[in-house]
Structures are given as C-alpha cells and as structure tokens.
Image (tube, rainbow, N blue to C red):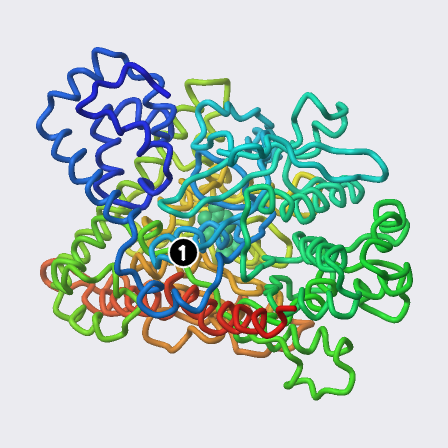
Amino acid sequence: MISKIPERIGRLDELANNLWWSWHHDARNLFATLDYPLWRASSQNPVKQLREMTPDKLLSASRDRTILALYDSAIAAFDADVSVRDCWFAEKYAGRFSGPVAFFSAEFALHKSLPIYAGGLGVLAGDICKEACDLGLPLIGIGFMYPQGYFRQRISADGWQEEIYEYLNFEEAPISPCAWPEGCGPLVEVRLAGRLVHIAVWEVRLGRVRLYLLDTNVEENAPGDRQLSARLYTADREHRMQQEIVLGIGGVRVLRALGMEPCVWHANEGHTAFMMLERLREEVAAGSSFEEGMARTQASSVFTTHTPVPAGHDIFPVELIDRYFNDYWGLLGTDRRTFLQLGQADVSGASFNMTALGLRLARQRCGVSALHGRVTRRMWHSLWPGVKEEKVPISHVTNGVHVPTWIAPELYQLCEKHLGANLMRECDDEHIWDSIVDIPDAAIWAVRRSLKRRLIRVILDKAQQRWVDRSVTGEQIVAFGALLDPDKLTIGFARRFAEYKRPALIFRDLERLKKIVGDRWRPVQIIFAGKSHPADFPSKHLLQQAFNMARNRDFLGRIAFVEDYDMLLSRYLVQGVDVWLNVPRRLQEACGTSGMKASLNGVPHFSVRDGWWHEGYHGRHGWAIGEETVDLAKEDETDAAALYQCLEEKIVPLYYRRDRSGVPQEWIQVVKNAIRSAATAFSARRMLKEYTERLYLPAAELRKTHQP
Ligand SMILES: *Cc1c(COP(=O)(O)O)cnc(C)c1O
C-alpha cells in the first residue's frame, strides 16, 4: 500500500497491482505519462514506479488534466471489465460449468516485472490467463514463485554467455500475499521423502483472473527446502522432482485451502501432472476404489503436451519415484507396480515419464499444432495398442497469441480506425478483417517504419547503457547493434538458443551471406537475441558463433546480437523487424509462437514448414523455406540453400521495390495478409475458444456423469 497517493488518483495502486493494465492501452499510457523517466528506468513496472515517485510528483499528477483524463478512462474501463459483463463465456457457456478451470503450469510469462518464465511455454500460459480474462472464462492459474526466476544474460567480449541470478524484490513485483478465507492458510503442506514442506502462496491479479504462485521460502522450512522454489528448470533431477511435487500436489491443496471446487483441471505440459495424482488420492480418501477414482480424475482432466521429441519429456528414474512416493501409492489404493505403470512409456519400465502420466490420467489430451498432434499420436501409439495410429485419442489445439499484449498500439489504432471499434472484441472473426485492403498502404508503411525506428532506438539505448556501465570493447558495442540502420531490410531471429532451432543455419555459406547483407543498394541486417539454458554447452557455442559473426568486421555491423532476451525485448523485436526467421529441424518445433506475434504486427514469417507454419503457410503472407519433407541427412544443406535463394530472389527484391512515393506496395500486401491471418487463426482468442468448446466443456460434462 502506498499512503502518499492523493485521493483523486487513489486507485493507481490497485491498477498497478493488477496486470490488467499491461494489455490496455489507456492504462499503459497512464503509467507512461505519469512519470516517463521512471517508467523507462523501471522497465515499465508501475509497482516500482509508484514506490519511487515523490509525493510532490504525485500531487502534481493529481492536478494534471491529461493524466486525470487517462486515469478516469483507465479506471472506468477496468471497472467495466472486472465487473460481471456480457462477455463471450457468460453468453454461451456459463450455466454449463459448475466451477472454474484450474490451469497448472511450471512457468507463466505475464510481464517483464515477474520473471518466472523461460520461453514459449510460459508465454503461452500467460497469454491463456489474459485471454481468459478477456473472454470472461473463470480460470485460476497455479504456478511457482521463483525469486531468482530464470537468469539475466550477459555476453562477454569473446561471446560467452554469463548468467546473472538476481533476487526479485517482491515489493516491486505485481504480487501480493494470498488473501485467505477466514481460518485458512497461510501455509499449505506437502510431504517430501518423509519430511514436511510448507508452502506460502502469492497472488497475481489479471482483471478477474487470479494466479496463485507457490513459494517454499518460509522460515518453517529447512534451508534446503527454502531454496526449492528459487530457480526455474534446474538440471538436477531430484530437485526437479521435489519442485513438481510441490507444484502438482501442493497446488491442489492450495486450491482446496482456498475453498475452490474447479470443474476442469488442466495440466499444461508434464511438469504439472502430479496434480492429477493428488486428485486421485482425494477420491480414494473420500471412499472410491482406485479404479473409480481414476475414472473420475480422468473425466475432469485436460492435458496438453508440448514436446515433439522423446528427449524433451520430463522423465524420472524409478529410484526417485520410490523415494518420494513409497508412502503415497498406498493412499491411492494401489501398489508400487500399478503406480509405476502410470508413468511407463516403454516396456523397459526403467523410468517414470510425466507425459505418459498426463496422457493416462486425463481424458482430454492435445498437442499444440495440427502437425504436432500427428507426431504425438505416432509417438504415443504404444499407450493405445489396439487402436490405429490416426485414432489414438490425442487431438490438438494450435497455440495462439494474446492480441492486445503483442500487437503494437499504433498498428492496432490504425486498423481500428478502418475496421471499426469492435475490432478487439471480434479480432478472431475473418470478416471483420475484410476491409484491411482499404487501409492506405502508405499509412501501414509509416507505422512499420516507426516501429523499426523504435526497436533500433531501444537496442541503441541498451548498447549505450552497457558502454556506460562497465568496460566493454567497441567490438562488443557493435555486436550489440550500435551500427543498425532503420532503412535496411531487417531480419529478426529471437528465441531460446536450442540446437534444434538451428540459430547458426544462416551462417552455413558465409560468402553468400556476406553478399546478401553487404549489397550496396539493397542491404540486409540481421538481429539475433536469445538465451541458452545454463547447462546446455552446445547451445552456448551456437550463441558464441552468432555473437562472433556480429563482431566480425566483414559483416559491417549488419549482424547484431542483443543481450537478455525477455518479454519486453521480444515485444519490441516482433513489432520492429521486417521479417521473422524460423528454421527448426523438421518435426521438432511443436508449434512456435514468436512467428505469430511477428505476423500479427505485419512482420511476415519466413520459416521451415514445421510447427504452426505447417498449417499456417498459404503463400500470400510469408515464405516457406525448403520443401515440406527433405532428405534429413542433408536437411541443413538444403534448407540453407533454400533460405539464401528465397532471400535473394523473393524477399529482398520485394522489399526494395518501391513506388514513386517510396512505398513498397507489393510488400505491404504481404504485410496486410500476415496481420489478418495471425489475428484470426493464430490468436489466443481462437485458441481459448477452442479449448473451452472442445476440451473444457466435454470435461465439465463428463465430470457430472461421474459424480457419485
Ligand atoms: C514468444 C516468446 C517465445 C517463444 O518463441 P518461439 O519462437 O516460439 O520459440 C520465447 N521467449 C519469449 C520471451 C517470447 O516472447
């Protein structure tokens, strides 16, 4: 609570502590206008900003007409949104759900100020929560409060990634201690190999949606247990198992302690699948047999798998299961052998596979793109031996991105002006986009140019900051992007640096690449960003390779590597570059979402036809690299050649073909098609409607038929 805020703007604190502000333009604008230097210095974190604003400054804000107008309109929109209203869910489905949807995920990416995510999985979870708020779907998120989060990235002069772990200052984060009902809380308990671990709970507000974050850093716990929730994705298996028990089993207990009775339970990826075991335990404790309990748990459970490659699944050795669950399977009314079978993925039975567990304990199961659905049915065919592969009961819901979070406000306002004020509400409706053809090409071009200038400004700021902060070399500053130029065709490549994403593919033929970027009349520049997992050395070498190219004089400063990729930088990048590059090995990218964010901003996707691009590509809103299937032994070679050829023959000429007023008209047609396609087919709105209608509703109904 901040006491110094004058009454006239007294609800600023409430607004700052509800992340609703982050995807509503008036509210964002309010905080940006309130104190612009602090807004920037806090990396757009209003909680921190309000703490640091002086009483004088707040007082004068409370008398500033511009600020008051923004404040009043933001508060009015907030109140209208948070109160019960005529939202999609209330109109169509409210009566058919007896309780909320509980959504479990190991990471959530909501805002830079809450660094509890590593990549795409977290962004998806965050976008689902925000969309649930917009659609009025009653959803409760359950996750982990990692005080050290994922790390911050620094790149040394020779291109090696250094990880910095900083303790989050909880006072400056948009979280508050959970508000427990009378007589409950504040701690929930789970057992870990015989000892008791206490869990505290933090609450994050997103409009009406609540997210509960579990935290083991409490005095009651032993020092080792206090560290349990410190960091995301540690490499140690035992530590991971403990985290997943806290999240899955502890998460269910937290909801119970809060008096909640969800009617659908959604496990987002295998990390959270222990949640289903705990509900099975509850059923057995209430008198069911193991079999009845299983049937009831399955009925109301939804499981999404995100991993298309066997190595990506979360797997525990049986010894660990023995250590942590030998006092648990008895509570399920079963024995060790049956329990181990729940997580068995192959005949050897040597390990316990969390994806197998999720698939067995949920009746509604899905992958995250059409192609990934197919790959998943093949990969898990052995769980349904008598069934034909295409009949394996795993469907798919293609991921989507939260439009208000990711679209640039300038671009959105331009579209709204031409397509109508209902655009945001109906952005997933094909027809509302019909008149995008009427938006003047020059107007779109002007917005695109200003977004690129803003991105480069941000990159220069970061580079200058580094120059001021510490001794870095001139070469490093060039590598960080000091020579970028807003008039050049700019390619973006930003994502986790994982080997399968082939970040170095574009360096396969350096002579050819030099010709492309160094072209005198039609130059090209490439911006890289992304983190390597701290324990992933091959990936760190790939990152070093990209960084070394960026500081290589032969490239004339036309390759840049921007440090510390996170949600905020991602937002600038997907809005600001001209083309979004994506080159995963085939069948290894489950979906991918950064390309959707880029397309939404009129940055066409230039990608191998894997993940969402397999269903998304239709030739008029981006480019495909290589054929759908290639000889896998030569995949790198053929894809690199196809990538260069497409750049040389299609992308570069199209971008630089201008009309008399300097507008690349044909390019703008691709831009318009990209925006329309992403906003309709690849929005979180389309995705969450699909989840609701195809998975949540059947689960809610099945649950009723399984009531005792
Ligand atoms: C969107 C996003 C991702 C996911 O990108 P992919 O290309 O799908 O891997 C990862 N990290 C951040 C910060 C993002 O915003």
Q: Which amino acid does label 1 sit on?
A: Ala
Label 1, secondary structure: give it: helix
What residue sits 56% from the left and 49% below the top?
A: 496
Image quarter (top left, top right, bottom left or bottom right) of the N terminus: top left
Q: How many marks?
A: 1
Per the image, the residue denoted by label 1 is 132
611 horizontally vs 136: left or right:
right
| Dot 1 beta carbon under 8 Å from ligand 1 | no
| Depth order, front residue of 469/2 | 2
Q: Give residue 415's quadrant in the image.
A: bottom left
Residue drawn at point x = 40 percent, y = 61 percent: 684
Quick check: 157 left or right of 401?
right
Mark 1 Cα within 10 Å, few/some/many (few <14, many 20+)? many
Vertical placement of residue 405 versus 642, above or below: above
- Residue 148 in the image, given as x and y percentages of width and height: 59, 30
**Relative to 420, is 696 on the left or the right?**
right
What percent of the width, then of the height, locates residue 272?
65, 53
Q: Return the residue nearer the eye: 673 or 25.
A: 25
Give percent across and percent down for residue 274: 71, 53
- Asked where in the image residue 599 lies, by quadrant, the reply is bottom left
Question: In this view of the protein, which residue sits in the foreground, 661 or 116?
Answer: 116
> For this rendering, which residue is in front, 695 or 657?
695
For the C terminus, the image quarter is bottom right
Q: In which quarter of the image is residue 597?
A: bottom left
Please provide percent x and percent y for residue 321.
Answer: 85, 51
Position of 537 with respect to 139 (left or right) is right
